Image: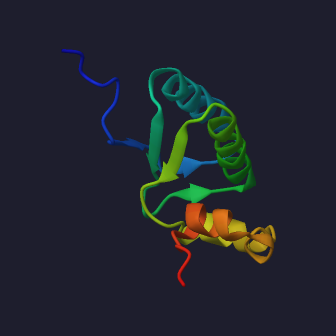
Amino acid sequence: MDTPKQYYESINLPEVLSIRTVSELHSKLTGEFHGRDTIIISIPEGAEADLSFVQLIESSRRQAKSKGKTFKLSSPASGSVLKVLERAGFIESFDQEDENFWLHKEVTL
């Protein structure tokens, strides 16, 4: 009996999520895309992020969607990630899918 390729464990990211580490993060995520159908990333609570990280995650979301994979955050954006989203104007232009991904806001009736 084959064991599924994946379990729903989170991929833990480092504390520094910036232009200095974006290449390493990109390689890590690319590797995960090859081996999993569901990718869940865990951002450390005190992580320091910049716009390059948000851009990488947005790019990864699009890649996952185009390949029929699931890509999620283990918890809502907070701390410096949330501040980057706010300063860059992302939150103002979020649609429901974006709110669900970044803020874990589900559609309610």
- The residue closer to the viewer here, 32 or 87, is 32
Q: Residue at x 54, y 28 (%)?
A: 33
| Most distant residue in the left direction | 1
- The residue closer to the viewer here, 65 or 79, is 65
- The residue closer to the viewer here, 109 or 92, is 109
Q: Is residue 32 left or right of residue 60?
A: left
| Most distant residue in the bottom direction | 109
The x, y position of residue 92, in whole percent, is 78, 77
89 shown above or below 33: below
The x, y position of residue 71, in whole percent, is 54, 45
Q: Is residue 60 left or right of residue 77?
A: right
Q: Is residue 1 left or right of residue 36?
A: left
Does the rendering let one see residue 13? no
Q: Tell me which corner region of the image, top left, top right, bottom left or bottom right, holds residue 2.
A: top left
Q: Residue at x 69, y 53 (%)?
A: 54
Quadrant including the N terminus: top left
| Most distant residue in the top direction | 1
90 shown above or below 2: below
The x, y position of residue 41, in whole percent, is 46, 47
